Image (spheres, grey):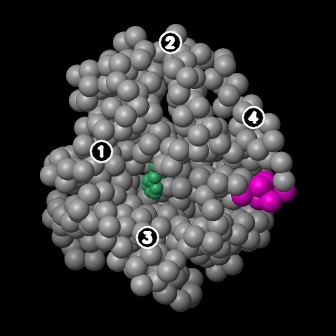
Amino acid sequence: MIKESSHGQWSGQAVFIMAATGSAVGLSNIWRFPYLAGEYGGGIFVLIYLVCLALIGLPVIMTEIMIGRMGKQSPINSIRKISEQNGRSRHWQTIGWMAVLASFLILSFYSVIAGWSMAYVFRTFTGVFDGITQDGASAVFGYLVNDPERLLAWHTIFILLTYAVVSRGVKRGLEPAVKILMPSLLALLLIMLAYAINEGEFFKGIGMMLFPDAGQLGSVKNLGFVILAAMGQAFFTLSLGAGAIMIYGAYLPSNVSITNVSITIVLLDMLFAIIAGMIIFPILLSTGLNDVVFNNGLDGAYGPGLVFQTLPLAFGQLSWGNLFGGVFFILIVIAALTSSIALLEPIVTYLVERYSWSRRHAASLSSLIAWILGLGTILSFNVWSDFHPLASIELFANKTVYHLLDMLASNILLPLGGLATVIFAGWILPWRMAEDELSMGQEYCGFALWRIAVRYSAPVLLFIVFVYSLLKAMGYLADTP
Ligand code: PHE
């Protein structure tokens, strides 16, 4: 058995945890989780989310790391190798193809949005939002997204940063990058937390996150929506189904316990999301802007609206808001960069294996394609904002190119890939092989639990998420309960 992936190996457990947590912690922790908690029932949502992390997140992340470490190659070739070794159809590698496609598509729009955050670092530091009005903040955002050249410049810079890390490989690129970026991310997070405690209405803010207006979970039907939203979030935030965790698992030394690192990553990702909420809520509350986001039902109030319009407005009213607003956007950029590295890695490793290219060459070509694909997202906000490629299909009638890319990746490819992965691990892979990999020759009582999860509970739950995501993407289900 080969001991190390031909692409390299993490120098230890701590670096792997930093890299995988970096992949997990991203835009969704900052703008999606706090919004979902505020909107879908606070503490109850958090509780449901925790259950989802335990029932789906943990078994799937363990499975992806395990498959990666068994195959030690790109997701496509790892799955193919394991299948062939065990006399199974090589077509299971389709899972790897879906993952690579998903990560590629996500990278193309992730980079554009990370570019907005970079633009906002400068806008906040230079005091653009000082005492600005709501209309003013919307205008600043509009001015940015309506200018394709500006968006293109920031998108290019962000893709180049990602390229700079990935093209240097595991030992000289990814590992040094996460060793610098992850401690910085933690430091900035703590600085922002201290600021929120000092400036914002901290305890009231946390109260609002955990105990929003009662009655939101009134009917059973609503509870169903909340559970499904929590499941989808658990999946996306852990970077599952995109090959990212699988390729990072391929570089994991064989003496590290997959169970331990998986639990750690899930907990850290959760902690990061909760702290993001502890920063955002007190700040919004102290400026009275929580109403704008949560009670007026503003269109697009979450995601871009929350981060790029409402929060800058709040920072503009607080003392030292320029400085700390800038710090907040740097934090977002770093969180996005450690995710985008993980999004580029699966395709680069595949090209290196398939064509024996140098990593630099493979990284250049894949970055270039992601960059070109990103143009579709950039134009969706301005020149092509009325261009709806699938207009002839009623369900997709008003979706822009960006919407369609996002839907295809997040709503279809990720959950489907996750579902296929657990079926592969639970029903196709010889279970002794999984047991060896997970127990590493020691007494291991978690295996039975993992096996039940990947054979039964996770596939059933993921199937539900998939159908739900699909219905939602097609517009059969509304966004809010
Ligand atoms: N987990 C990242 C986030 O929460 C997104 C991501 C998905 C990154 C898939 C890598 C792979 O923003």
For badge 4, the amino acid type reads Asp
Mark 2 against mark 3, which lies toward the viewer?
3
What residue is rendered at 32% in x and 19% in y?
130
Q: Between marks 4 and 2, how big is the CA–CA gap?
A: 24 Å
Label 3 element class: loop
Q: Nearer the viewer, residue 461 or 131?
A: 131
What residue is rendered at 77% in x and 55% in y?
222
Residue 218 picture location, percent across and down: 83, 48
For badge 1, the amino acid type reads Gly
For label 4, the residue is 213
Q: Nearer the viewer, residue 282 or 136?
A: 136
For label 3, the residue is 398
Q: Is residue 8 visible?
A: no
Estimate how packed mark 1 is, as few (under 14), some (14 to 19) or many (20 or more) residues with alpha carbons within 10 Å: some
Residues at badges 4 and 2 in contact (C-beta under 8 Å)? no
For label 1, the residue is 142
Residues at badges 3 and 4 in contact (C-beta under 8 Å)? no
Residue 362 picture location, percent across and down: 21, 66
Q: Going by the image, does 8 lie left or right of 89? A: left
For badge 2, the amino acid type reads Glu
Among numbered discs 3 and 4, the one appearing first in the sequence: 4
Q: Nearer the viewer, residue 345 or 390?
A: 390
For label 2, the residue is 199
222 inside magenta stretch: yes
**What's the magenta region?**
220-225
Label 2 element class: helix
Residue 193 picture location, percent across and down: 51, 20
Among numbered discs 1 and 3, the one appearing first in the sequence: 1
Q: Between marks 3 and 4, how big is the CA–CA gap?
A: 33 Å
